[in-house]
Image: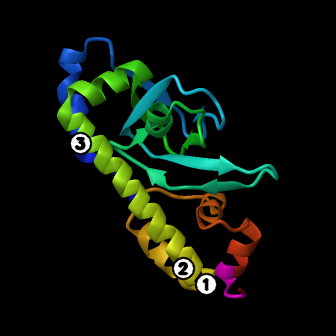
Amino acid sequence: MIQTNLDLLQLINSMLPAAGGAITSRQFEAGQRFIYQDQEILQVYIIRSGVAKPLITEENGKEYILEFLGEGEMLGEVEAIRGTRTVCGVEAVTPVSLYAMGVGQFHYFLQTVPGFNTLVMRLLATRVANSSVKMARLQLYTMAELLPRLQEMLAAQQIEFTKQDLAGYMGISVRSLNRLLKGDG
């Protein structure tokens, strides 16, 4: 459930001495939003520690959580590559420590560090595959069938997720989640 990319984190850690001040550190508290939907992206982030949730907020105020991202996962790379505004916001689920680099620096690393480019391509391919599997499951199974699978995955995590987060991840209301948990739905 929590995606990680330890190979990318290891590469960034090895690049730090040569990068000078091009890669900086930032910290955010649990519940703090640090990327806002439909903003210009100025930095690309790599999660050093903690868990973050990218989410899309619809016009009706409902939020859909795309995934939960942990160590080594990248944020803002899609917008930096495409040159577009952010598709989603990102909020810290736990305290989060990030590496940050400007969009120009991100492009420079893509062009000059083959290992970085390869890991970013793998990250993007993994995200496409994971999104496809998640969407297929949401189409092919009822929420009542999906909830036990999700609960099994959560049991393996060491983080307490709120009902709001679980509902947002499943694309349902908290009320619907409560009914499922009670066995009424």
Q: Is residue 121 left or right of residue 133?
A: left
**In this figure, which residue is indicated by the disc labeled 3?**
118
Q: Amino acid at mark 3?
A: Thr
**Residue 131: percent from the left, percent from the top?**
47, 62
Q: Amino acid at mark 2?
A: Leu
Counting residues from the start of the chain, the first of labels 1 and 3 encountered is 3
User: Magenta stretch mostly in which secondary structure?
Assistant: helix
Most foreground residue, 28 or 57: 57
**Which is closer to the viewer, label 2 or label 3?**
3
**In this figure, which residue is indicated by the disc labeled 1?**
142
The residue lying at 73 percent from left, 66 percent from top is: 173
**In this figure, which residue is indicated by the disc labeled 2?**
146
The residue lying at 18 percent from left, 37 percent from top is: 115
Q: Is residue 141 left or right of residue 47?
A: right
Q: Is residue 167 left or right of residue 94?
A: right
SS category of the residue bearing label 2: helix
Q: Magenta residues, as a range?
A: 180-184
**Which is closer to the viewer, label 1 or label 3?**
3
Q: Is residue 149 left or right of residue 85?
A: left
